[in-house]
Image (cartoon, rainbow, N blue to C red):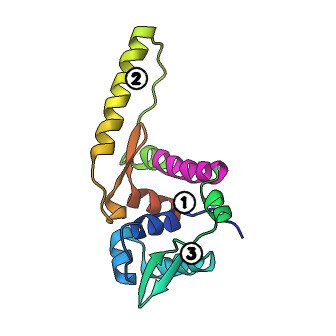
Amino acid sequence: MSYNLTILERMILESLQAHTQTLGELSSNTSIEAHMLQNSLKELLTKNLIITREGEYALNHQLNQTIRNELNDKTNLMCEVQEIINSCLRKTLQEGQSHFKLKKVNMTQREYKIYKGLEHNLEAFLNSLEKNDQVASQTLVFWGEGKYEDIKNSILNY
Protein backbone atom coordinates (compact mmCIF):
# COMPACT_ATOMS: atom_id res chain seq x y z
CA MET A 1 0.00 0.00 0.00
CA SER A 2 1.28 3.46 -0.90
CA TYR A 3 1.41 6.09 1.81
CA ASN A 4 1.78 9.01 -0.59
CA LEU A 5 -0.68 11.59 0.67
CA THR A 6 -2.83 13.89 -1.43
CA ILE A 7 -3.22 17.52 -0.41
CA LEU A 8 -6.70 16.66 0.87
CA GLU A 9 -5.43 13.79 3.02
CA ARG A 10 -2.63 15.98 4.43
CA MET A 11 -5.16 18.71 5.31
CA ILE A 12 -7.34 16.17 7.12
CA LEU A 13 -4.42 14.73 9.09
CA GLU A 14 -3.23 18.21 10.05
CA SER A 15 -6.71 19.13 11.20
CA LEU A 16 -6.96 15.98 13.32
CA GLN A 17 -3.63 16.66 15.04
CA ALA A 18 -5.32 18.96 17.54
CA HIS A 19 -8.23 16.72 18.52
CA THR A 20 -10.84 14.27 17.28
CA GLN A 21 -13.50 15.77 15.02
CA THR A 22 -16.85 14.97 13.51
CA LEU A 23 -17.41 14.95 9.76
CA GLY A 24 -18.98 18.43 10.00
CA GLU A 25 -16.05 19.84 11.98
CA LEU A 26 -13.56 18.39 9.50
CA SER A 27 -15.52 19.86 6.60
CA SER A 28 -15.55 23.27 8.26
CA ASN A 29 -11.86 23.17 9.24
CA THR A 30 -10.58 21.99 5.86
CA SER A 31 -13.20 23.51 3.50
CA ILE A 32 -13.24 20.21 1.61
CA GLU A 33 -16.60 19.44 0.00
CA ALA A 34 -18.53 16.64 1.72
CA HIS A 35 -18.25 14.00 -1.01
CA MET A 36 -14.52 14.59 -1.48
CA LEU A 37 -14.00 14.60 2.27
CA GLN A 38 -15.80 11.28 2.63
CA ASN A 39 -13.70 9.73 -0.15
CA SER A 40 -10.48 10.98 1.45
CA LEU A 41 -11.58 9.74 4.88
CA LYS A 42 -12.28 6.29 3.42
CA GLU A 43 -8.79 6.26 1.92
CA LEU A 44 -7.20 7.31 5.22
CA LEU A 45 -9.21 4.64 7.06
CA THR A 46 -8.08 2.03 4.52
CA LYS A 47 -4.47 3.10 5.06
CA ASN A 48 -5.13 2.82 8.82
CA LEU A 49 -3.90 6.39 9.35
CA ILE A 50 -7.09 7.44 11.10
CA ILE A 51 -9.69 5.67 13.21
CA THR A 52 -13.32 6.37 14.11
CA ARG A 53 -14.70 6.52 17.63
CA GLU A 54 -18.31 7.34 18.48
CA GLY A 55 -18.90 9.26 15.23
CA GLU A 56 -15.62 11.17 15.42
CA TYR A 57 -12.41 10.79 13.46
CA ALA A 58 -9.01 10.65 15.14
CA LEU A 59 -5.40 10.09 14.19
CA ASN A 60 -4.21 6.53 14.64
CA HIS A 61 -1.36 6.92 17.12
CA GLN A 62 -0.58 3.18 16.97
CA LEU A 63 1.19 3.25 13.59
CA ASN A 64 4.17 0.97 13.18
CA GLN A 65 7.59 2.48 12.42
CA THR A 66 7.57 1.30 8.79
CA ILE A 67 4.41 3.29 8.07
CA ARG A 68 5.76 6.34 9.95
CA ASN A 69 8.95 6.17 7.90
CA GLU A 70 7.04 5.97 4.62
CA LEU A 71 4.84 8.93 5.59
CA ASN A 72 7.99 10.99 6.13
CA ASP A 73 9.87 9.59 3.14
CA LYS A 74 11.75 12.41 1.38
CA THR A 75 10.43 11.41 -2.04
CA ASN A 76 6.82 11.42 -0.84
CA LEU A 77 7.28 14.78 0.89
CA MET A 78 8.94 16.23 -2.22
CA CYS A 79 5.92 15.22 -4.31
CA GLU A 80 3.59 16.98 -1.86
CA VAL A 81 5.71 20.15 -1.77
CA GLN A 82 6.04 20.15 -5.55
CA GLU A 83 2.25 19.93 -5.88
CA ILE A 84 1.82 22.92 -3.52
CA ILE A 85 4.44 25.06 -5.26
CA ASN A 86 3.10 24.23 -8.72
CA SER A 87 -0.39 25.21 -7.58
CA CYS A 88 0.81 28.56 -6.24
CA LEU A 89 2.72 29.27 -9.43
CA ARG A 90 -0.33 28.38 -11.56
CA LYS A 91 -2.54 30.68 -9.50
CA THR A 92 0.02 33.50 -9.71
CA LEU A 93 0.37 33.20 -13.47
CA GLN A 94 -3.35 32.74 -14.18
CA GLU A 95 -5.02 35.00 -11.67
CA GLY A 96 -2.38 36.92 -9.78
CA GLN A 97 -3.99 35.91 -6.47
CA SER A 98 -1.16 34.02 -4.79
CA HIS A 99 2.09 35.75 -4.10
CA PHE A 100 5.31 34.13 -5.26
CA LYS A 101 8.68 35.75 -5.81
CA LEU A 102 11.93 34.38 -7.10
CA LYS A 103 15.06 36.47 -7.27
CA LYS A 104 18.49 35.71 -8.66
CA VAL A 105 21.10 37.78 -6.86
CA ASN A 106 24.81 37.98 -6.22
CA MET A 107 25.83 38.49 -2.58
CA THR A 108 29.06 39.28 -0.86
CA GLN A 109 29.88 37.34 2.30
CA ARG A 110 28.66 40.30 4.35
CA GLU A 111 25.38 40.49 2.41
CA TYR A 112 24.95 36.74 2.78
CA LYS A 113 25.35 37.02 6.57
CA ILE A 114 22.73 39.80 6.61
CA TYR A 115 20.43 37.65 4.50
CA LYS A 116 20.89 34.67 6.85
CA GLY A 117 20.05 36.92 9.82
CA LEU A 118 16.87 38.11 8.11
CA GLU A 119 15.98 34.54 7.23
CA HIS A 120 16.49 33.52 10.88
CA ASN A 121 14.27 36.39 12.08
CA LEU A 122 11.53 35.45 9.61
CA GLU A 123 11.66 31.82 10.68
CA ALA A 124 11.55 32.81 14.37
CA PHE A 125 8.55 35.04 13.69
CA LEU A 126 6.71 32.30 11.77
CA ASN A 127 7.49 29.74 14.49
CA SER A 128 6.04 32.10 17.11
CA LEU A 129 2.64 32.19 15.39
CA GLU A 130 -0.04 29.98 16.90
CA LYS A 131 -1.73 27.26 14.88
CA ASN A 132 -5.35 26.27 15.17
CA ASP A 133 -7.42 23.51 13.62
CA GLN A 134 -8.79 25.82 10.89
CA VAL A 135 -6.39 24.26 8.38
CA ALA A 136 -8.01 25.78 5.29
CA SER A 137 -7.41 29.32 6.53
CA GLN A 138 -3.70 28.80 7.18
CA THR A 139 -1.19 30.53 4.94
CA LEU A 140 1.70 28.50 3.54
CA VAL A 141 4.91 30.53 3.45
CA PHE A 142 7.82 29.46 1.27
CA TRP A 143 9.40 32.57 -0.15
CA GLY A 144 5.91 33.43 -1.05
CA GLU A 145 2.47 32.54 0.20
CA GLY A 146 -0.83 31.04 -0.83
CA LYS A 147 -3.92 30.04 1.07
CA TYR A 148 -4.17 26.31 1.67
CA GLU A 149 -7.76 26.35 0.45
CA ASP A 150 -6.81 28.13 -2.80
CA ILE A 151 -4.01 25.63 -3.40
CA LYS A 152 -6.36 22.73 -2.76
CA ASN A 153 -8.98 24.18 -5.12
CA SER A 154 -6.38 24.84 -7.80
CA ILE A 155 -5.11 21.27 -7.61
CA LEU A 156 -8.63 19.87 -7.77
CA ASN A 157 -9.56 22.06 -10.75
CA TYR A 158 -6.34 21.64 -12.72
Residue 4 image point, x, y percent? 63, 62
Q: Mark 3 points at which residue?
A: 44
Q: Residue 28, located in which quarter of the rendered image?
A: bottom left
Q: Mark 1 points at which residue?
A: 158
Secondary structure, mark 1, is: loop
Q: Residue at x 54, y 60 (%)?
A: 158
Q: Is residue 23 or residue 148 the one in the foreground?
A: 23
Q: Residue 142, located in which quarter of the rendered image?
A: top left
Query: On residue 26, which mark appears?
Result: none
Q: Residue at x 36, y 67 (%)?
A: 18
Q: Say which label, 2 or 1, has the lower sequence index.
A: 2
Q: How many marks?
A: 3
Residue 150 image point, x, y percent? 40, 58
Residue 66 image point, x, y percent? 68, 62
Q: Could you tell me how far apart the alpha carbons at marks 2 and 3 are, in whole angstroms?
A: 39 Å
Q: What residue range appears in magenta?
A: 74-89
Q: Say which label, 3 or 1, has the lower sequence index.
A: 3
Q: Which amino acid does label 3 sit on?
A: Leu
- Between circles 2 and 1, the one closer to the viewer is 2
Q: What residue type is labelled 2?
A: Lys
Q: Name the residue under label 2.
A: 116
Is 82 covered by the magenta stretch?
Answer: yes
Q: Residues within 10 Å of mark 1 (few under 14, many from 20)?
A: few
CB-based contact (under 8 Å), mark 3 and mark 1: no
Q: How crowded is mark 2: few (under 14 residues within 10 Å), some or many (20 or more)?
A: few
Secondary structure, mark 2, is: helix
